[in-house]
Image (spheres, rainbow, N blue to C red):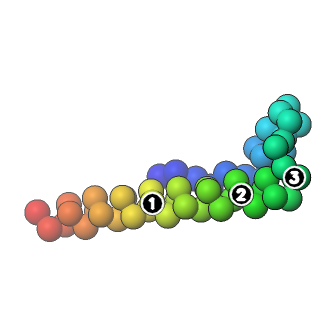
Amino acid sequence: MPLSIDQQAINVYAEHNDLPVGPHIFNDCIFALDDLFLEEAYKKVKAKSDSGRAK
C-alpha cells in the first residue's frame, strides 16, 4: 500500500533543487498530485480485493 508523501521529503527536495515556482505553490501542487496518485492506488487495491471475493 503506498503512503502519502510527507512535508519533510518535500523540504529536502526543495533544499537541493531549484523550485520552478514559490514554495507554497510547489507544496500545493505536490500534495494535489500525491492525493490523486493515492486515490488511484486505493481504487486499484479495492478492485483487486473485490474481484478476489467474487471468485
Q: Earlier in the sequence, mark 2 or mark 3?
A: 3
> Identity of the amino acid at label 1?
Glu
Between the residue at mark 2 and the residue at mark 3, the CA separation in whole angstroms equals 10 Å
Between the residue at mark 2 and the residue at mark 1, the CA separation in whole angstroms equals 17 Å
Q: From where the camera sits, is residue 33 visible?
A: yes
Q: Earlier in the sequence, mark 3 or mark 1?
A: 3
Please state the horizontal and vertical placement of residue 15, each as a whole percent of the image. Answer: 88, 37
Vertical side of 2 occupied by 35: above or below: below
Quadrant of the image occupied by residue 19 = top right
Q: Is residue 23 left or right of residue 44?
A: right
> Within 10 angstroms of label 3, few (less than 14), some, or many (20 or more) residues?
few
> Identity of the amino acid at label 3?
Pro
Kind of element beneath mark 2: helix
Q: Which residue is mark 2?
A: 29
Q: Which mark is residue 23?
A: 3
Q: Nearer the viewer, residue 41 or 17?
A: 17
